[in-house]
């Protein structure tokens, strides 16, 4: 029976393999187009301050990486190894800053630590000067803001690693005479190195992709250079060559991640082990621990939300007609429509990819499907320029065939370019969510359907689709929220007069209309909490039960 069943899987192998490969090739077109355009551009026409942009990018990556490592590892160790008031609450609430986009926290920091902010006025009253406070509204502000919004990536992975190492590892180190600090530094921290390397890679990729936050603080990175080069001169060649430089930074980050990981892999020989029991803090130490976790949470999420709510209420009371004007509804509708279209497109492609891989089971299909996830690691500026270059080449090709006007400004004259770039950028989370749900479907179910004469498409529609609907729902939510938050792609590719909520927040904050930006910014934060809640829920379900010792 099993032999018969194994032969049944693979029906339509050739057509499904071809479909997966075609999807992978189409999704790869923007990145390939950037490389081809840069090589064919001839002599580089790069900006004069390229060296300064490269140095700024390196320093920003190093600063955010170091800050996220210190905060993420420190807080993960605090809530894992020690028990103090509010520890259980802090253990999941410290993830909430992930829901705060850096460009939203950025203009809140500028309003607080700028020359007109309360801390600066207090500093001038006490010391006659405020330059120390105002450093946070200058170049130092960008790495601080990004660290506060991105450290949860390191925190989540470090915490999972510390809990997974179990009581036995800690006890062994202590029995051999190691002090608590030495046991942490020489045993537990090295064991967590693969997880930390993965978290830091995500942090630095997000830093490299950022566009609005660094502009608020006057920091000019290579990603900002791509946008300014394109918007300033509409020079494809220069923008493509700068995009290759950004792509080079992305490859460098992934290489550093591999080096930090060092091929390390640690397996448990005893299955799921209970985590080490946290040590109960007493006296002033318990309140210091509570203050340390609380100050990071308050700075990165709670106080910014309170400030946004206060501004939104004040702005609404001052001018309640702003909610009834067409602009708010139009921008919200634009964001909702783009998010819905992107989610539907990404999930449809993810379903075809996952089903195709399951039908064929071959290395070619699996490799092609993995290739489609590369776009998530590519900075948005590179994808945006790649889409422009690809559609420009399509225009020239159509005109050569006698089609006047080619595609007719399909990129810069409509939202098709934005949608195409969204698919390239966000297909990865959709594919991973759908693929995870497919793994819960037994192959025997698929083979039973084939034995009854069902076609591959009928199996997808009647078997795989209903059984993976929870994963499909998660994929729809993840892509939709990412699309609402996305900023660089919309700024690069939007047609004239087209504005989304994220662009609206960016434009208002850029003109110092902070109170007017508060309500749409709150909307983005509220939407971003949804995938964070999904993430926390999955982590909590996967964690073993823990006991506390004193």
Image (spheres, helix red, strand yellow):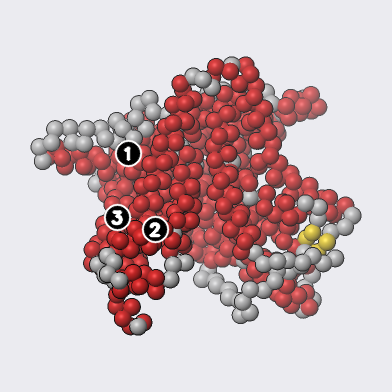
Mark 2, residue position:
465
Kindly identify which numbered label has been placed on residue 23. 3
- 231 on left or right of 440: left
532 relative to 495, above or below? below
CB of mark 1 within 8 Å of CB of mark 2?
A: no
Mark 1, residue position:
417
Residue 378 position within the rendered picture, expressed as x and y whole percent measured from the top left:
41, 50
Residue at point 63% right, 31% down?
308
Separation (CA) of disc 3 from disc 2: 19 Å
Q: Nearer the viewer, residue 549 or 469?
A: 469
Between disc 3 and disc 2, the foreground one is 2
Residue 1 visible in the displayed image = yes
- Dot placed on the residue nearer the N-terminal end, 3 or 2: 3
Mark 2 Cα-neighbour bin, 10 Å: few <14, some 14–19, many ≥20: some
Farthest right residue in view: 283
- 104 on left or right of 389: right
- Dot placed on the residue nearer the N-terminal end, 1 or 3: 3
Residue 7 position within the rendered picture, expressed as x and y whole percent measured from the top left:
29, 78
Residue at point 35% right, 72% down?
448
Separation (CA) of disc 1 from disc 3: 17 Å
Q: For numbered disc 1, what is the local secondary structure?
A: helix
Image quarter of the N terminus? bottom left
269 relative to 312, above or below? below
Q: For numbered disc 3, what is the local secondary structure?
A: helix
Q: For numbered disc 2, what is the local secondary structure?
A: helix
Residue 81 position within the rendered picture, expressed as x and y whole percent measured from the top left:
75, 63
């Amino acid at each position: 029976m099993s032999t018969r069943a194994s032969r049944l899987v693979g029906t339509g192998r050739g057509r499904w393999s071809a479909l997966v490969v075609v999807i992978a090739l189409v999704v790869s077109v923007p990145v390939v187009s950037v490389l081809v355009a840069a090589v064919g551009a001839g002599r580089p026409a790069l900006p004069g301050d390229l060296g300064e942009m490269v140095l700024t990018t390196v320093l920003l990556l190093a600063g955010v990486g170091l800050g996220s490592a210190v905060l993420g590892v420190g807080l993960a160790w605090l809530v894992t190894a020690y028990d103090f008031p509010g520890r259980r609450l802090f253990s999941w609430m410290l993830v909430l800053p992930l829901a705060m986009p850096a460009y939203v926290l950025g203009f809140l920091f500028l309003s607080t630590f700028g020359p007109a902010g309360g801390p600066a006025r207090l500093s001038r009253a006490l010391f006659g000067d405020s330059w120390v406070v105002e450093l946070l509204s200058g170049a130092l502000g960008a790495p601080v803001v990004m660290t506060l919004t991105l450290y949860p990536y390191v925190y989540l992975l470090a915490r999972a690693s510390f809990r997974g190492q179990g009581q036995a590892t800690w006890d062994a180190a202590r029995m051999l005479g190691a002090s608590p600090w030495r046991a942490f530094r020489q045993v537990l921290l090295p064991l967590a190195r693969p997880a930390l390397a993965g978290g830091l890679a995500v942090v630095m990729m997000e830093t490299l992709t950022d566009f609005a936050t660094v502009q608020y603080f006057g920091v000019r990175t290579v990603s900002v250079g791509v946008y300014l080069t394109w918007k300033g001169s509409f020079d494809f060649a220069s923008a493509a060559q700068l995009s290759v430089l950004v792509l080079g930074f992305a490859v460098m980050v992934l290489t550093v991640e591999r080096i930090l990981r060092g091929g390390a892999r640690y397996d448990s020989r005893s299955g799921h082990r209970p985590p080490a029991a946290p040590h109960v803090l007493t006296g002033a130490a318990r309140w210091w621990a509570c203050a340390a976790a609380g100050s990071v949470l308050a700075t990165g999420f709670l106080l910014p939300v309170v400030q946004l709510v206060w501004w939104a209420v004040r702005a609404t009371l001052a001018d309640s007609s702003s909610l009834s004007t067409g602009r708010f509804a139009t921008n919200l509708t634009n964001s909702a429509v783009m998010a819905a279209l992107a989610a539907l497109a990404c999930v449809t492609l993810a379903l075809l990819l996952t089903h195709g891989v399951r039908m064929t089971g071959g290395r070619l299909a699996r490799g092609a499907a993995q290739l489609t996830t590369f776009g998530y690691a590519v900075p948005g500026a590179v994808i945006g320029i790649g889409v422009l270059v690809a559609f420009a080449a399509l225009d020239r090709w159509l005109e050569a065939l006698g089609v006047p006007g080619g595609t007719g400004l399909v990129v810069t004259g409509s939202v098709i370019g934005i949608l195409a770039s969204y698919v390239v950028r966000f297909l990865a989370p959709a594919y991973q969510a759908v693929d995870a749900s497919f793994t819960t479907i037994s192959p025997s179910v698929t083979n039973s359907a084939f034995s009854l004469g069902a076609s591959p498409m009928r199996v997808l529609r009647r078997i795989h689709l209903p059984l993976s609907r929870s994963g499909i729902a998660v994929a729809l939510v993840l892509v939709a929220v990412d699309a609402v938050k996305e900023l660089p792609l919309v700024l690069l590719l939007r047609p004239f007069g087209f504005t989304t909520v994220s662009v609206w927040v960016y434009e208002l904050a850029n003109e110092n209309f902070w109170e007017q930006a508060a309500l749409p910014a709150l909307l983005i934060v509220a939407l971003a909490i949804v995938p964070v809640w999904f993430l926390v829920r999955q982590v909590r379900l996967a964690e073993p039960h823990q006991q506390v010792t004193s």
